[in-house]
Structures are given as C-alpha cells and as structure tokens.
Amino acid sequence: MKILVCISHVPDTTSKINFTDNNTQFDTNGVQFVINPNDEFGLTRAMWFKEKQGASVDVVNVGGPETEPTLRKALAIGADNAIRVNTPAKDGFQVAKELAKVAQDGSYDLIIAGRESIDYNGGMVPGMLAAILKANFVNTCISLEVEGNEAKAVREIDGGKESVTASLPLVIGAQKGLVEESDLRIPNMRGIMMARKKPLNVVEPVDSNQATEVEKFEKPDAKGAVKLIDPDNLDELINLLHNEAKVI
Amino acid sequence: MSVLVYTESEEGKFKKAALEVASYAKEVAGMMGTTVTAVTFNAEDTADLGKHGVDKVLKVSNDKLNNFNAEAYADALTQAAEKEGAKVIILSQSANSKYLAPLLAVHLNAGYASNVMALPESTDPFTVKRTAFTNKAFSFTKFTTDVKIIGLSKNAFGLKENQGDAAVEDFNPELSSEDFSVNVTNVDKARDKVTIADAEIVVSGGRGMKGPENWGMLEELADTLGAATACSKPVSDMGWRPHSEHVGQTGKPVAANLYIAVGISGAIQHLAGVSASKTKVVINNDPEAPFFKAADYGIVGDAFEIVPKLNEKLKEFKAKNA
C-alpha cells in the first residue's frame, strides 16, 4: 500500500498570534513551527501501516523552503520520502489542487490529511482533495483499518460515531483519536540522522489560482476584568447569568 | 440566483443550526436583493423554514438519503445550486456540514470560507469575517470565485423570525452509484444527551475534578442546565472522559452561549478552543489560574462544595422561572 500523508507547517499551539504589514501577514517572529497536530495523528497511523503491513509512506507539504524542517521531522519519524510543492499555501482550494497533482503522479492508495490545520482552520483540504481525485472520503476519522483494497473506518459525528466501509483509493481527514496521544513519536537521534539522507523532492506548482484571499487579520478585543463572586453568594452568579449575561 | 441553504434535520425535525442558517441567509439575500431557497432531505413539515426567512423549499424525498451521506448530499446540493443559479450557498458547521462543504466546493468550483462569524462585510467584493488560529484571531476573507460557500459558526448569528410561508417544490436529484461508495455500517449515537455541537451551554471539567468518579456532579449540573459535558485535554488524555469531549485547539472548539469551566486552569490551547463562547464562568480553587483572566465571572473556591450548591440553586431558579 502506498500512503501519502499531507503535512501542514503550523505555529505551535502555545504560540502567541500577532500580525505585521498592517495586519495582513502572520508574524512568524519567535514562533516555533510544528507538524499540524491533526496531521501528526495521521502520520503516526501511517507509521503503523508501514511497520505492520509493509506500506510505504511519503509526506508532502505545500509551502516555501522554510517548511523543510517540518518535512525533515516527518522523515525522522519514519516517512520514506518527502515532497515539497514550491509555493506558499494561501488558500485551501489552491493547496488541495497542488496536493491532488502530487497524489495523482504518485498513484497513492491512501491519502491522509489532518481534518483541519490549527492556523487557518479551513477544514477543507482533505474533502477537496478527495473530490478532485474522485476518491472516497471519510472525514473526522478516528479509526482506520485496511485489508487489501478495503478500508474500515470510524468517524466522529456530532454526539457519537459512525462506522463505514469504503474501497481504496481513499482520502481521510485525520484527527485526535485516530491514534492515542501516547503513541505519537518524538524523532530520535537515529531517525534524525537517517532523515538527512532521505530524499526531499521539490516540485513546482501547477495552479496558482486562489478561491479566497485574506484581506487582513484582526485580534479579538481585550477582555474586561473578571467579576469575582463570593462562593457563599451563588445567588449573585445566577442573577448575573440571568439578568446581565442573559444566558440562563 | 437565490441564496441556497442546506437545512439539516434529524428524524424530520430541523436542527436549531438549520434555522440559524436560514435566518442568516435571509439577511444575506436582503443584501444581495434576492431570495432564499432551502434544500431539505426527507423532512416533512417545512413550515419552520418559512418562519425563519426561507422563500422556497426544494424538498428531496428519497429513502436512500435517510442516513447522511456526504457524497450524495453534496451531489444533490450541487444540482439544486445549478438549478437555482445560486451564487451563495450557506451551511452550518456541524460535523456533517463540514464533511460535505468541501465536496460541494469542488463540484461548483466555489471558494469556501468556514467558521464565519457575522454577516458579510460586503457583497461586492464578497468578504466575510471568520475565525482563524483557533479563535485567537479573525481573518477577513475575500472570495475570488463566482460561487461562494459559507460555513456559519454556531450561535454566531442567532435565530431571527420572519413571518412568511415558503413555497414547497419536490426535487429529485439524479444520484449515481458512486454517491454511495462509502457505506455506513453502524451508527452509535447517544440520543438522550445534549451534544457539544448542539449545546448552548457547556459544563466542562479539568484535572481539578481529581478523577472520573467525580463527574457525576458535573453531569447533574449539565442536566439541570440542559447542557453538554466537556473536558480539558489532560482529562481526555488520562482516559477519564472520551476524546470526543476534549475541548481545545486539538480537540473541539466550543461556541456556546455559556461555558462553565470547573477545575480547569486554562492553558492557552484550551482558552483558544472556548474563546468564541459568549459568557464564561470559571470555578477554581487557584486564584492565579490563567482562566480567570479570560472569564466573565469567576468563583475562587472548592469545586466539590460549590458545584452541588450551585446545582441546587439553579434547580430552584428553574422551578421559579419555568
């Protein structure tokens, strides 16, 4: 089985978010970039398929040269090859088209992408990729088994879960639950050394059209001070929630 | 060229999110000088849609669509959009809507903006305000495509009643066998519980709850308030509560009207996940807990004493105001 894992290069979850150039650009100053957490769950599941079922695992990212350390990290975790599509990721549709080209060129059986990236939270790339490829698609995937050409998956739905079957080629939107948090891997020294020798191919983009453009960013207004309530006066809290906040 | 909305129903009844999408669409249609057309799947009584601004209902009745199916629903909505010449399509941000919207976007070669917070800033160019960086910022996003798809965040707009009757038209989209190539084999859904996705109030617990055996009091409080229960990341990592209840940057974002956090200190990732909620109440025995800086109301004290007392008082309040 040939697996492609799509990797988004995102600010660490602890990052403070700031903007530059008149609030039009994300300020990368002092920000640590990581593999998008939803992609990391997917990458870890791909490693399981590699180790237990002999799958090959390639990783791909759409982005400039600054994203290569993130791809190298994926190689250090155990991916076999990395591909970088040499264009900034500006819009989900544009990213999906670039990923689809890589997926078609490599004839992958299983394509794993995080359900959404934690920077732009678009939540569209896996579904768009599946639709462009005319492949089956399971979003918010929390369990995946593949036997031959058939996949059994579980997806999270509002208030529960749903089990599905689908044949390959398949695209999944991965998220927490697909593997246990404790199974996520930290690259070891051997992995890091080996990653240096693994291929990282740079390919040129095929389509630079965007469907959406960010005009500017804005930060939420600063919050007013908390109103502290005496634990012995819970009636006051109920009064405030009813009359002031009007939420009960 | 009406505004098209996907209105979700369950067992024939429209979800609140569907009525919110209809209310929002009515305003967008007003800005564009056009009407609202809703697509329904196996819903019988569509009167509620008319009351929330829908002018016309395209009613799909097909037993094969009793269970949600992203590909088939996206195919049906594509045909409805083409038939109506819809340039703007609006969905909610439920798990199902998030599943089908990207498929629909590719079918219609449309831009898609998810997590939209408010009415469009303008309709020419078509620009919307959406959350980004898991609620740590907003992005003003401009569409460059002819057809635009909007995913409206829950509780971002609210319900707005409009007196009106929707005209109903039967609609039979052509579906192919490929629409049914992902087969649902089992659905496991808690029917009697409020889900995080539908909840207007969420009661959430953290490590301060000391163990899964202490969740009973939070469930009772949630029950009194008609709320869903949720938890912080360490709680789901330790297996005290299921992953599906984990709220935060790598879990679920919550945009409730009221979020009550008990024994949660408020890590940056957790705060990002809840900051779209309107009112936040924090109960914690550590006055230095970072969550107090993000909260509207706070109580410093022992959750094990406060929560049962609060529950009793809320029951009395509910009884009086019923």
Image (tube, coloured by chain):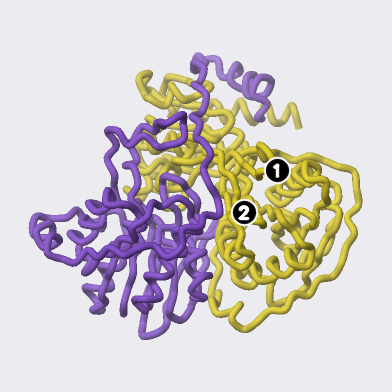
Residue B108 falls in image quadrant? bottom right
**In the image, is B152 to the left or to the right of A4?**
right
Q: Which residue is mark 2?
A: B192
Secondary structure of the residue carrying tag 2 is loop
The amino acid at mark 1 is: Thr
Badge count: 2
Horizontal and vertical percent position of residue A145: 37, 74
Can the viewer see residue B194 in this picture? no
Quick one: label 1 or label 2, which is nearer the N terminus?
A: 1
Indicate which label's residue lies in the foreground, 1 or 2: 1
Residue B274's spot in the image, x, y percent?
49, 36
Q: CA distance from mark 1 to mark 2?
A: 41 Å
Give the residue at mark 1: B123
Circle 2: residue type:
Asp
Judge if badges 1 and 2 mark residues of a common chain. yes
Give me the residue at 42% from left, 21% from top: B301
Q: Are there few (<14), some (14-19), or many (20+) residues within 10 Å of tag 1?
A: some
Q: Secondary structure at mark 1?
A: strand
Q: Residue A60 occupies which quadrant of the picture?
A: bottom left
Mark 1 belongs to which subunit? B
The hue in which chain B appears in the rendered picture of the protein: yellow
Q: Which mark is residue B112?
A: none
- Closer to the camera in the image, B306 or B288: B288
